[in-house]
Structures are given as C-alpha cells and as structure tokens.
Amino acid sequence: MQNIEKIIRNEQDFLIIGHISPDGDTIGSGMALLLALQGLGKSAIFVIDGKVPEKMAFVRDYAPVYSVADCPKRDYACAIAVDVSDKGRLGKAQPLFEAAKRTVVIDHHGTNPAFGQENYIDPVGAAGLLIYRLLTQMHIPLTQPMANLLYMAICTDTGNFSYSNTDAPILYAAAALREAGADIPRIAENIYQARSLGATRLIGRSLEHLVLAEDGKIALTYILQEDFGVCGALIEDTEELINYAREIRGVEIAIFLRQSEENQFKLSFRSKNYANVAALAAEFEGGGHIHASGGKLQAPLEQAISRVIAAAARYL
C-alpha cells in the first residue's frame, strides 16, 4: 500500500475506473477515492463502461460519472482500477487504463491476476473496505459524501451485512463511516426500499422460471430478453434476483441466467456455506469470490440450464 500512497501524493492527474455492469461497490469505492483525490487538490475523473443503476443515481449529487464515450481522452498520469477483478472487466475503458503512465489496481477479488504496475489486492468483503483503509492510512478526513459512498459500497457487497463476508473489520468500518456522517436511512431507502413496479414484476417472472435440482441443493432461475418488455423492467433490475433462489431453505448453490443475446447468457453464482462458486465460474470464462461469482455461456436455454446445473453439482 505504501507505493500506492506515494503515487497518490506525487501524481496530479488521475483516472479512476470501475468495472462493467457497475454495482454499488465499484461505484461507491471509486467515487469515494475520487472525492478524496479532489480534496487533495488533484485532477481526477471517474469513468465506467455502463450505467449507474437508478437506485444509486444520488451519487451524481457528489460528482460526475463519465461514460467511456464522454471521458476526456488523454494519457493520464495514473489510472486506478477499483473493484475490477481482471483487465477484461474494464470493458471499453481498458485502452484508457493501458495508456496511463502509471497503473494501479485496488481490488478484493482473490482471483485478481494483479494486472496493474502497483496492486493492492486483499480478499476482504468489499473494495470499499480497502479504500477506507487507504484513506485512513493516509490520514485523509472522511466527508459525509465519502462516508455515504463507502457505506454503500460495503453494505451492497455484503448483502446489507448478511453474507458470510460480513466480518468484524467490515462492521468496524461501517461503524466508523456512521460516525463520519454516513446517512444510513437515506442509503437504505435508495438501495433497498425504492423498487420500481417493473422490477417487482420481474421478480415474479424469475420465480416462474425457478428450477430446483440435486434434492433442492441447487436453485436456478433465469430471465429472457422478452421478459424485460413484458414486465417493463431494466437490465439493472436483475441484480438481486439470484438472492430469491439463494434464500430458499436447503439451497447451497443459486444460479441466475440473464439472456444477453440469442443463445447467449450472463451467469451469476452464489453459495451459502461451503461451495466454491469462484471455481465453478472459472468453468464458464468467469471468476469472482468463493461465495459470489459470474461467467458467461453460449448455448440454447435448455442446454445452458443442463450444463450449469451439472457443473454446479460437482461442487456440492
């Protein structure tokens, strides 16, 4: 971490990049770092290849979030990838990262290949905890917007402090962020209590597609492209659908398939206790954490379902 601290102290022009299909951790962590750098008088921009989910739109009150198309194109002094598990997850922002004079990776995925010149990789519950540690180590005061962003990062990646990655350091950091002014009721209302009608209908649609296997230890559901129009829902509304399968009593591995194109699916995997879904995801060109991961698969729907269930069964 010391080398990264030196880079932050010495460089003046930063590009912070989150991962494709951005979630609360990459947005919250990246933007908290952005505000910290700006507070130090640095030039800093945050860019993602994807849209900010509607429920997180309040983050735009703190600073702009650039798309790759709108991001100023130049060779930045330093590019920092936050919560990005491998270079491919930078999406269309990858050339911007590679063109920077210095590259840094701050990430909590144990599968990260350390693709930066400097890397701070620690498989903790959320990248937000790593940014919190970095800012604390550098004695950078936490403003209320920074506390809000880091709290959002941590709470979303721990399932609102319900997943197995919720350990003592995560809870200590959350308490410190509350003391720094994190507005927990506002964050909770935006993230967990403002579901659209379309998103609610999509939950029902996914449950209609529910498949159980291996004596109820595997639960799989899926959403097809046509379901979005029928329900009036958005792609971002699928983010939490896997949890409805995971929460069924007796389920160890939950699987969610989202059709991206004909015969092409984005895969999400979750486990409750012992199953290593990071290894499972690696069989489908993916990766992630032991209890949360993702991948992709090209096959007709019925074949896709059969293949992922058969693969998952080997991890029970």
Image (spheres, helix red, strand yellow):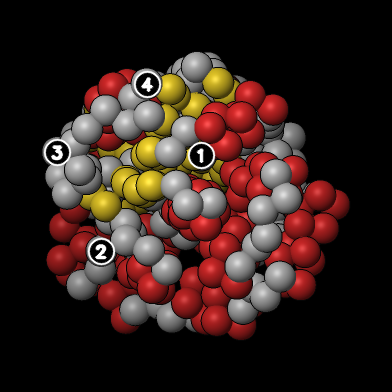
Q: CA distance from mark 4 to mark 3?
A: 40 Å
Question: Mark 3 belongs to which amino acid?
Answer: Glu
Mark drawn on residue 101: 4
The x and y percentages for residue 267 are: 39, 38
First of labels 3, 2 by sequence position: 2
Mark drawn on residue 234: 2
Question: Mark 1 belongs to which amino acid?
Answer: Asp
The x and y percentages for residue 255 are: 48, 43
Q: Residue at x 81, y 49 (%)?
A: 169
In the rendered image, the quadrant that contains the C terminus is: top right
Q: CA distance from mark 1 to mark 4?
A: 20 Å
The x and y percentages for residue 129 are: 68, 48
First of labels 2, 1 by sequence position: 1
Mark drawn on residue 262: 3
Give the crowd class for mark 3: few <14, some 14-19, many >=20 residues within 10 Å: few
Mark drawn on residue 83: 1
Position of 74 with respect to 216 (left or right) is left
